[in-house]
Amino acid sequence: MTIRGRTAIVLVAVLVVSLALNFFGAGLIAAGVGFRERLAGFDRSVLQLAERFPREIRRAVAADLIARREEGFKALDELRAARREMFAAMRAEPLDRMRLERAMAAVRAKTQALQAFGQSGLAAALAAVSAETRARIAPPE
């Protein structure tokens, strides 16, 4: 089953933001920074991030992502395939560490590509709105 239309574009955008936040959170955990209390509300932070942008920017991002939806679906499909390979490598017996590391590198690359896709939509949206609108973007706390 393939999801198409605005719902799919919104899901791709949310996935991109979620992946970025997940990698940021994983970096904090790996670094040993004690933000467990803050990470408890991690799911809410994805929605809060979108709320930081004025409606005009959110609409422009959605329009850009809709216009490029086939590219977004392709990037998402490639990420899913890379993740399936990574999990297959994790379960393989005996464990082939080189295969696993290649699969993990592929997931990182596909995640970065999907993130770049979403960020390019944001950059296009920002280029299309006024400085006054951009000034209304709420910075992180």
Image (tube, rainbow, N blue to C red):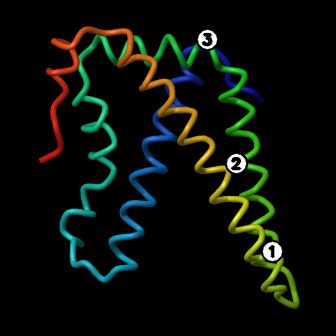
Q: Is residue 70 left or right of residue 13?
A: right
**Other residues around mark 2 within 10 Å, as few (<14) / some (14–19) / many (≥20):** many
Q: Which mark is residue 8?
A: none
Q: Which residue is drawn at 26% across and 63% down?
A: 40
Q: Is mark 1 on a helix, strand or loop?
A: helix
Measured as percent of width and height from the top left, residue 126 is found at 35, 19
Residue under the image location 31 percent in, 37 percent down: 47
31 lies left or right of 23? left
* Image vertical order of residue 67 relative to residue 27, above or below: above
Q: Name the residue under label 3.
A: 67
Q: Residue 89 carries which label?
A: 1
Q: Position of residue 19 (x, y in %)?
A: 49, 50
Task: Please tell me in which quadrant of the rendered image residue 46 appears.
Answer: top left
Badge 3 vs badge 1, beta-carbon distance below 8 Å: no
Residue displayed at 33% across by 16% down = 57
How far apart, in angstroms, are the residues tagged by discs 3 and 1?
Answer: 35 Å
Q: What count of labels does the image hold?
A: 3
Work out how far the residue at label 3 is from the one at label 2, CA to CA, in angstroms: 20 Å
Q: Nearer the viewer, residue 39 or 139?
A: 139
Query: Which amino acid lies under the numbered mark 1 shown in the image of this protein?
Result: Ala
Dot in front, 3 or 1: 3
Alpha-carbon span between mark 1 and mark 2: 15 Å
The mark found on residue 79 in the picture is: 2
Left or right placement of residue 19 versus residue 50 in this view: right
Residue 64 on image: x %, y %:
52, 15
Q: Which of marks 3 and 1 is nearer the N terminus?
A: 3
Q: Is 141 rendered above or below residue 67?
A: below
Residue 23, position as x, y percentages in the image: 45, 60
Query: Quarter holding the N terminus?
Result: top right
